[in-house]
Image (cartoon, rainbow, N blue to C red):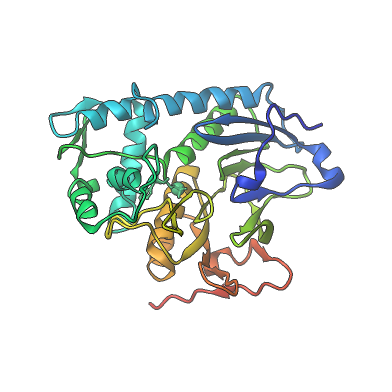
Amino acid sequence: MKQVRITVAAMTMVAILLGGGCRRAATQEEGFAVMGTYASVVAGGGEGPPVAGDARICEEKMLENDSPLSLFRTDSELCRLDARSGPGPVRAGRHLQANLELALRFGTLTGGAFDVTVGPLVKMWGFSGGQTPAERVSRDRIEEALRRVGYSRIRLQGGEVCLEATNMVVDLGGIAKGYAVDVCCDELRRRGARNFLINLGGNMRCFGRPESTRPWQIGVRNPFQQAQIIGKVDLEDGVAVATSGNYERFVVIEGKRYAHIIDPRTGFPVEGMAGVTVLAATAAEADALSTSLFVLGMKEGVKVVAAITNGAAVFIPDRKPLEVWVVPAITNVFRAGAGIVPQIIVTAH
Ligand code: AMP
Ligand code: MG
């Protein structure tokens, strides 16, 4: 039986959990709204005890994560940190510290393509609570904002964090949902759950199996026709998957669409990429990785994928006809849809 407290707007999600038909009876799914998006917990019917109230437990954990890390709650630890930008350190709780540590790691790994201090630009382009600009943002404004961007100006030491310049804005939107999924997975496992999948706005991680005979499987959305999938990915125990897409959140300025992911090196929203789906060992890494690869593109992105334990990726460039590019590491778990021939990215050594 399927329980859904609210209608899970699966169509807005970037990767879809695949079940269907009579097989669904083996799983129980419950969805709820949290962290500005939809979450769901699917309990598998494989071996091992089901955990009572697992969706409630996850909802609580997600809220516990959201309250210190949200840019939309003026009393959050993150907003207090941004407000103290320049003057001095603030104490950081464990979730904020963990997110910042990971953010700094990805900042370094991607040469600054992933940068959580991109907040002033994110807002300037109309995301994360910013007003949609009436016209294309001017170079002067971008240059002014860029002076406040730079992950290396986050100082994290002994449980305290300091932003070294004034008016910096840390935006954890590219990482915090994945991190929250890991926190929930740890909690459900601690309580004995063995077969489940957690999805928070397209950031997923699964354990065990939905049924003893088959693995968890997700569909990768076609960014140009979102009701369709371009292929399926089988997920092994513990694997996380995340997608960043230009169709998830965007603004239209003077008739042109701008995606919600900003290239911190130029200050402009990224163009040229329609969707990136990644696999990684944790949901936090998958979340950071998908945003990073969206900015870096295929050529630079594959080098970062190679540096991540169990990292793998599917890239869909923003051009037609549809092209699907995959790294060799994903070929044994990715099955392309009918009529789609994935191209394998060959990296030069
Ligand atoms: P995702 O959907 O996981 O790719 O995350 C996108 C969100 O991450 C945006 O809505 C912003 O909040 C934030 N963001 C945008 N650009 C970057 C960037 N270059 N590095 C880190 N976070 C970013
Ligand atoms: Mg992300």
Q: Is residue 324 visible?
A: yes
Q: Residue at x 12, y 30 (%)?
A: 87
Q: Of all residues shown, which one is farthest toward the left?
A: 87
| Relative image position of residue 170 (x, y in whole percent) | 30, 39
Q: Examine the image and state in which quarter residue 92 appears.
A: top left
Which residue is nearer to you in this view: 64 or 246? 246
| Relative image position of residue 156 (x, y in whole percent) | 22, 36
Q: Residue at x 15, y 40 (%)?
A: 165
| Relative image position of residue 270 (x, y in whole percent) | 39, 60
Q: Residue at x 73, y 42 (%)?
A: 210
Count of marks, rendered view? 0
Question: Is 212 located above or below residue 139 in the figure?
Answer: above
Is 314 on the left-hand or right-hand side of 95? Answer: right
Q: Is residue 307 visible?
A: no
Question: Is 106 located above or below residue 313 in the figure?
Answer: above
Dividing the image into 4 quarters, which one contains the N terminus? Answer: top right
Q: Examine the image and state in which quarter residue 272 appears.
A: bottom left
Which residue is nearer to you in this view: 218 or 266? 266
| Relative image position of residue 95 (x, y in whole percent) | 38, 30
Q: Of all residues shown, which one is farthest toward the right?
A: 22
Which residue is nearer to you in this view: 251 or 73? 251
Which residue is nearer to you in this view: 253 or 315? 253
Q: Residue at x 32, y 30 (%)?
A: 78
